[in-house]
């Protein structure tokens, strides 16, 4: 029987600090156009791929909603089948939230972005306009430009002369990059949030240099008519002992100011045995360091990205978070920001990864067991030989589909597969996804509602590519408008000026929205 939770009950949990996971189970595209502040995007299409890491506790309170499409009921049932015991639907869905007076936000990772705007508004974080920075670069002034995004984003487009230093690394590595106190440090990202947080991180840490954010990041640079670099490879250097020591001293002072608490490995082990608090174990070092050796049970969550997009790692608001690194600097910095963002139960692991048994390599996302049954698989080679007798359905996201798929494959959003079925050509159905995992879950559901033969491409589209078979690009075969993924105006190099300006205008209004919403619990140091 469906259980309903009201908007007032959800808001009370958020305000009072009680655990709650609020999931928007539509695709990311519709989600990005309207959702509550702390709603996390968890499309029905991809529940199996993401939920076990987002909600590691089986009886954590979960509320799902849609906007009248019928996805919430299906998501509730699916979560219960997976083993979650405390699942409800939001009464009235998104429209019910609106009618109850709940504030509606657009875009993605909104809590982090709204917090960044509040930081700038409260602390008056210093910034320079694009033309001012360009003039300093042209004059060969004593400056360093530090790009606080992920390296992959930096390499796509960057400020001329800029060096890639992801935000979580700034405090640790700034002394090696700007050893003279007279050097001015300029921090940039694509838009605003990581520039603001990166700049304020250095100020909060007490570095002696002047620090400025590049106002509006690469978007501001582009709108000013300036040229960006493409394919830059400048990265931070190897960390010196002096820089580490200075960063540790600064982190210790920041921990005292922010109220960052440490926790022993023994206590964490006890917490892992508890069933009444949702626990997240996150390693905030770089992905390369994580893969070289990390503690069992920890996930890679580079500190700058964790602060920028907390909802991509943590699905339960007011859950417990334990952060680890190797010397306390990056974990303390990330913890200081999470505390200010209203997370009341954040801890830094004493000693970090030192002294513990370490695992190597990447940590794969946790997935439920693959459905058992009689779903057939087909190898890439066999599918290539039988293409004329099969209907291939690709369940990857539209960007992944467009980048390369089995020729002739139909792009179908998994949550809409049953509605698409009658409109697809006759023939045996072969489902594929990036690595085949999602296709297996979808095939089990599909086999229950159709008499048509159903199979899964073994290894998914990645196996097809690895076999050297041809790919088709774009989205030439779709039954409906492609709207599953939000195109971010601050990523890539083909964004319209109007979209970039609209994005900035939206960010400028977030502080007022926060005040109207009233659920955030943010407090800026």
Image (tube, grey):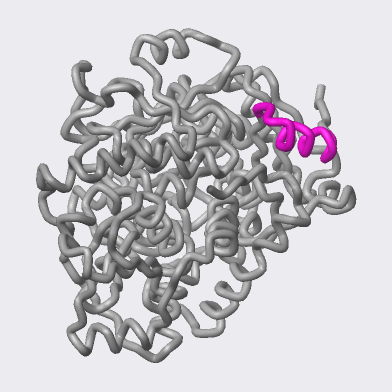
Residue at left 19%, top 55%? Answer: 175
**Left or right of 395, for residue 28:** right
Residue at left 29%, top 53%? Answer: 170
Q: Which residues are magenta?
A: 6-19
Q: How many marks?
A: 0
Inspect the magenta stretch and tell me whether residue 508 lies in it: no
Which of the pair 211/109 is nearer the observer?
Answer: 211
- Spot occupied by residue 416 in the image (x, y as percentages of width and height): 62, 49
Residue at left 66%, top 34%? Answer: 75
Which of the pair 78/236 is nearer the observer?
Answer: 236
Q: Quadrant of residue 74?
A: top right
Q: Main secondary structure of the magenta part?
A: helix
Q: Quadrant of residue 153?
A: bottom left
Q: Is residue 359 above or below residue 97?
A: above
Residue 418 visible in the snapshot:
no
Q: Quadrant of residue 64?
A: top right
**Left or right of 3, for residue 203:** left
Toward the right, the furthest residue is 99
- Spot occupied by residue 243 in the image (x, y as percentages of width and height): 16, 48
Q: Is residue 450 above or below residue 201?
A: above
Residue 459 visible in the snapshot:
yes
Residue at left 47%, top 30%? Answer: 53
- Spot occupied by residue 239 in the image (x, y as percentages of width and height): 13, 47
Q: Is residue 232 above or below residue 373?
A: below
- Spot occupied by residue 311 in the image (x, y as percentages of width and height): 53, 43
Which of the pair 124/291 is nearer the observer?
Answer: 124
Q: Classify the position of the N terminus by image quarter.
A: top right
Which of the pair 380/217 is nearer the observer?
Answer: 217
Toward the bottom, the furthest residue is 225
């Amino acid at each position: 029987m469906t259980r309903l939770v009201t908007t007032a009950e959800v808001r009370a949990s958020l305000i009072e600090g009680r655990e709650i996971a609020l999931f928007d189970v539509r695709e990311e595209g519709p989600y990005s156009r309207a959702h509550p502040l702390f709603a996390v995007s968890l499309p029905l299409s991809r529940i199996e791929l993401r939920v076990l890491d987002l909600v590691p506790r089986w009886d954590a309170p979960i509320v799902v909603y849609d906007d009248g499409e019928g996805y919430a009921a299906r998501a509730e049932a699916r979560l219960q089948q997976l083993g979650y015991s405390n699942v409800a639907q939001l009464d009235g869905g998104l429209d019910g939230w609106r009618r109850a007076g709940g504030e509606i936000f657009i875009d993605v990772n909104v809590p982090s972005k709204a917090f960044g705007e509040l930081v700038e508004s409260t602390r008056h974080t210093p910034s320079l306009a694009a033309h001012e920075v360009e003039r300093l670069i042209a004059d060969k002034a004593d400056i360093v430009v530090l790009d606080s995004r992920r390296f992959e984003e930096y390499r796509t487009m960057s400020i001329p002369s800029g060096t890639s230093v992801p935000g979580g690394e700034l405090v640790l590595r700034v002394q090696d990059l700007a050893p003279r106190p007279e050097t001015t440090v300029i921090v940039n990202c694509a838009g605003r949030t990581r520039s603001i947080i990166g700049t304020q991180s250095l100020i909060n840490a007490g570095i002696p240099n002047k620090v400025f954010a590049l106002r509006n990041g690469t978007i501001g640079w582009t709108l000013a008519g300036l040229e960006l670099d493409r394919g830059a490879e400048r990265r931070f250097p190897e960390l010196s002992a002096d820089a580490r020591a200075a960063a540790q001293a600064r982190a210790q002072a920041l921990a005292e100011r922010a109220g960052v608490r440490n926790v022993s490995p023994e206590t964490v082990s006890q917490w892992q045995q508890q069933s009444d608090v949702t626990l997240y174990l996150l390693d905030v070092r770089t992905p390369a360091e994580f893969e070289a050796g990390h503690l069992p049970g920890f996930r890679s969550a580079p500190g700058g990205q964790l602060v920028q997009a907390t909802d991509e790692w943590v699905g339960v608001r007011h859950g417990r978070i334990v952060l680890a690194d190797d010397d306390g600097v990056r974990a303390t910095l990330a913890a200081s920001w999470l505390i200010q963002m209203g997370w009341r139960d954040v801890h830094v692991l004493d000693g970090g990864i030192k002294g513990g048994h370490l695992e190597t390599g990447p940590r794969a996302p946790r997935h439920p067991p693959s459905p058992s049954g009689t779903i057939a698989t087909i190898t890439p080679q066999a599918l290539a030989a039988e293409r004329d007798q099969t209907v291939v359905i690709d369940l990857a996201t539209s960007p992944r589909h467009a980048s390369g798929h089995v020729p002739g494959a139909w792009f179908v959003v998994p949550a809409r597969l049953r509605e698409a079925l009658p409109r697809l050509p006759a023939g045996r159905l072969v489902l594929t996804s990036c690595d085949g995992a999602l296709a297996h879950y979808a095939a089990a559901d599909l086999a229950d509602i159709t008499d048509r033969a159903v199979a899964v491409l073994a290894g998914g589209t990645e196996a097809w590519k690895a076999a050297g078979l041809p790919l088709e690009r774009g989205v030439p075969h779709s039954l409906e408008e492609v709207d599953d993924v939000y195109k971010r105006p601050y990523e890539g190099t083909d964004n319209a000026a109007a979209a970039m300006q609209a994005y900035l205008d939206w960010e400028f209004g977030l502080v007022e929205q926060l005040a109207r919403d009233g659920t955030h619990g943010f407090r800026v140091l």
